């Protein structure tokens, strides 16, 4: 640190500064940025004074450098990637990196920024920490299936602790896109189809990543992405246009972003899609208008990978400069990968196409983020402790949390004749299927820092649980996708020799996530044929599914004994699967997304509108199909247990509630009616029976996880308020309208126990 800089307090800077003109020649050697006192990191007035002072010293090029974020080496997922290099840092061209981690590397790059640039502004390192960092947790769709916000918060907390120990300050998560089309590969990255569940999970993840104190060394900035309606990609084809109504935008796709903002998310990433012809990277109304003006959000809006450049192929920008102008004027602060802001905005500013105020606003937000992360206090605080990096990588506590999260995320779809749990005293167990020892399928996609050698595979998990008393007979049977059925005979022979069979079927991780969309939801390759051939042996057959989207596995119903949806369960997946298969843990996950009977039903989701002709089996001219029932294979919220639960005594506290300040309390008694202890996710759905606009047939408005011993009962109470009963009227104003409401409570979205109350005008 230079002596001048050391002596300069933020106040002195404020009074003594000269704004630097665009053309002012600057020294490129002496670092001039002062450091702050850590204790002021939460003080917004101090932050403003500090950042204003710094901003006043910056040239346009230095400002635009702050908005330029290249990918780190080896992280290229787009068409025109550019790796940042050390000379670019030295020249002040780079404000942040993504995809770079590790204390050695981040410290080395940080040192260049701090010691060899004129202003010494620290770099900030971002990374795709989507479901854990090195300790890979279950994929986000699986975590949502836990319906356990606290466990999800804890998972994000562990990810933040581990990632920050690896020099990361900022994560590109949570992905909060609602997805109602399982063809879309990125359904695996979010919390599924429901805005309520999605909002709860979004807030939990933001809180987990950011903790209570952003400047603490184990917290990271969270990024809610992708703003907005990315999950509505037409045809389930990634990057495609989103053709949705304004109502759907506000009712379905925006709520998880609002929840993220309310939870304090410091960053939001723009989406690749357009809405009604306006690409999100140029959507001033939604970014500056809705996010910043209406919601009062002051965080960093980061582009997606080459998102600014893609304004050209979208057909709204004729050249790079146009694209940059559209992006910055829409309020997109950081240009990921394109380098358009850095290279093409100087000319646009000189030509008056972009104001300096607009640039300053974006730079200010970037500097705020660095300030809030404590980087002006100590730029090396996340990277200076190699011992911490080792101690906080894949340690027993992190592994235990990953195992617990996986256990809670599994959804028991079928369990005929109590096929599960299996006994641990089986003499022989056949283990069949292409994924029984597939390490990458435990990690799933977007496990960027994950390593295959960290994984406990299903076979390893089963073997560890069973010990030497049980012989495993392993047969692959088929590949995941190939159509070669020649291995089925061997698999059948293995099943015939065994007391029971566990099959590991599904998708490999590259069949979901970014750019991995499918037009079929069937089990790929000959896996269905394999399962049916094995089931025909008459042995008890359990299918464990490993996959990143709903699959149409109706052909297995009634043929195999049990189906456990295990998603992509993370490094501890094999152990967690064994825990559940042998009954050490009773499964309790619920589907965060509807499973269709076949791809032709898509989109199918529980919160659909009734239509003027609600489907009725006996009536031809109603809304349904002639070749399959209109109902799904498994409804949203479905999930069985090794015990059973009964619901009764549903009651609303008041028969009538006033329209002005509607408050209602709903209670229900839940009883464990089976023979094992278990957790039930009690779900509350609400229907506004008649409104000024057509409403969904029901909407999730609360859920609670309860643990009950056999025979034990518990009364569960839900509170309903304005937001739970409100609709958007024809002018998209949020109102509660007088009339009757129905509440439904139960263990899935088909819950039939119902009660009514009335909202009355004064
Ligand atoms: C593109 C993806 O859409 C986004 O989610 C991710 O954060 C960036 N690439 C960076 O890897």
Image (cartoon, rainbow, N blue to C red):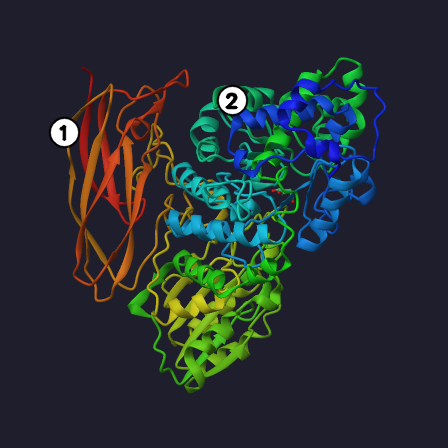
Marks 2, 1: nearer the viewer: 2
Q: Mark 2 points at which residue?
A: 290
The quarter holding residue 38 reads top right
At 66% from the left and 23% from the top, the residue drawn is 12
Residue 261 point in image, percent of width and height:
48, 32
Task: Name the residue rendered at 19%, 41% in the picture.
Answer: 667
Query: Element under label 1?
Result: loop
Q: How far apart are marks 2 and 1 (CA)?
A: 37 Å
Q: Where is residue 388 in the image (x, y as percent from the top left)?
A: 58, 58
Q: Is residue 330 above or below residue 28?
A: above
Q: Position of 511 compared to 625: left or right?
A: right
Write down the residue under mark 1. 655
Q: Ligand 1 appears in which quadrant?
A: top right
Instruction: Tell me, yes or no, if residue 81 can be seen here.
Output: no
> On the rendered structure, is 96 left or right of 201?
right
Residue 716 location in percent, x, y?
21, 46
């Amino acid at each position: 640190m230079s002596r001048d800089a050391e002596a300069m307090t933020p106040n002195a800077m404020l009074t003594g500064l000269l704004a630097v003109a665009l053309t002012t020649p600057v020294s490129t050697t002496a670092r001039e940025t002062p450091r702050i006192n850590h204790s002021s990191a939460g003080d917004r007035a101090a932050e403003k004074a500090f950042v204003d002072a710094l901003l006043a010293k910056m040239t346009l090029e230095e400002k635009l450098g702050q908005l330029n974020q290249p990918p780190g080496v080896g992280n290229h997922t787009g068409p025109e990637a550019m790796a940042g290099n050390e000379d670019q840092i030295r020249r002040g061209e780079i404000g942040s990196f993504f995809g770079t981690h590790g204390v050695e590397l981040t410290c080395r790059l940080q040192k260049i920024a701090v010691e060899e640039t004129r202003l010494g502004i620290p770099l900030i390192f971002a990374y795709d920490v989507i479901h854990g960092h090195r300790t890979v947790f279950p994929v986000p769709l699986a975590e949502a299936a836990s319906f356990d916000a606290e466990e999800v918060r804890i998972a994000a907390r562990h990810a933040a602790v581990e990632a920050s120990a690896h020099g990361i300050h900022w994560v590109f998560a949570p992905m909060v896109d609602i997805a109602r089309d399982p063809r879309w590969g990125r359904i695996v990255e979010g919390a599924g189809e429901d805005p309520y569940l999605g909002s709860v999970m979004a807030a939990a993840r933001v809180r987990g990543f950011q903790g209570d104190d952003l400047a603490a060394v184990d917290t990271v900035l969270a990024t809610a992405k992708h703003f907005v309606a990315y999950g509505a990609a037409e045809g389930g084809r990634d990057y495609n246009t989103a053709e949705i109504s304004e109502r759907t935008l506000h009712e379905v796709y925006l709520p998880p972003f609002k929840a993220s903002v309310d939870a304090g998310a410091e960053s939001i990433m723009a989406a690749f899609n357009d809405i009604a012809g306006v690409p999100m990277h140029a959507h001033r109304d939604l970014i500056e208008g809705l996010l910043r003006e209406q919601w009062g959000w002051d965080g960093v809006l980061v582009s997606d990978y080459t998102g600014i450049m893609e304004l050209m192929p979208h057909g709204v920008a004729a050249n790079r400069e146009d694209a940059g102008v559209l992006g910055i004027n829409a309020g997109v602060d950081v240009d990921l990968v394109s380098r358009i802001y850095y290279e093409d905005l100087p000319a646009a500013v000189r030509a008056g196409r972009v104001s300096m105020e607009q640039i300053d606003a974006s730079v200010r937000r970037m500097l705020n983020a660095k300030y809030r992360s404590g980087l002006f206090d100590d730029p090396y605080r996340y990277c200076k402790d190699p011992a911490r990096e080792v101690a906080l990588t894949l340690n027993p506590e992190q592994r235990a949390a990953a195992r617990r999260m996986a256990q809670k995320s599994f959804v028991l779809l079928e369990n005929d004749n109590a096929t599960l749990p299996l006994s641990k005293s089986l003499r022989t167990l056949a283990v069949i299927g292409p994924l029984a020892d597939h390490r990458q399928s435990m990690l799933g996609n977007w496990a960027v820092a994950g390593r295959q050698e960290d994984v406990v595979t299903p076979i390893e998990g089963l073997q560890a649980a069973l010990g030497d008393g049980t012989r495993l007979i392993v047969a692959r049977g088929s590949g995941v996708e190939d159509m070669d059925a020649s291995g089925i005979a061997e698999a059948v022979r293995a099943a015939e020799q065994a007391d029971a069979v566990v099959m590991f079927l599904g998708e490999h991780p590259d069949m979901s996530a970014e750019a991995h969309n499918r037009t079929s939801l069937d089990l790929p390759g000959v896996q269905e044929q394999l399962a049916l051939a094995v089931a025909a042996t008459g042995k008890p057959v359990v299918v464990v599914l490993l996959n990143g989207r709903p699959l149409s596995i109706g052909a297995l119903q009634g043929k195999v004994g049990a189906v456990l949806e295990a998603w992509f369960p993370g490094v501890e997946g094999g152990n967690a699967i064994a825990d559940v298969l042998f009954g050490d843990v009773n499964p309790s996950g619920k589907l965060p997304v509807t499973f269709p009977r076949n791809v032709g039903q898509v989109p199918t989701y529980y919160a659909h509108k009734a239509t003027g002709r609600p489907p009725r089996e006996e009536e031809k001219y109603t809304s349904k199909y002639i070749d399959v029932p209109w109902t799904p294979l498994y409804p949203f919220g479905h999930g069985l247990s090794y015990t059973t639960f009964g619901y009764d005594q549903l009651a609303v506290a008041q028969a009538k509630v006033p329209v002005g300040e509607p408050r209602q309390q709903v209670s229900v008694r839940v009883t464990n009616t089976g023979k094992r202890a278990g957790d039930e996710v009690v779900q509350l759905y609400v229907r506004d029976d008649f409104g000024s606009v057509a409403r969904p047939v029901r909407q999730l408005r609360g859920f609670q996880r309860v643990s009950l011993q056999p025979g034990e009962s518990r009364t569960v109470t839900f509170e309903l308020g304005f937001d739970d009963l409100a609709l958007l009227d024809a002018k998209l104003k949020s109102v509660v309208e007088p009339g009757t409401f129905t509440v439904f409570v139960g263990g899935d979205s088909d819950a039939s126990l119902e009660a009514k109350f009335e909202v009355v005008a004064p």
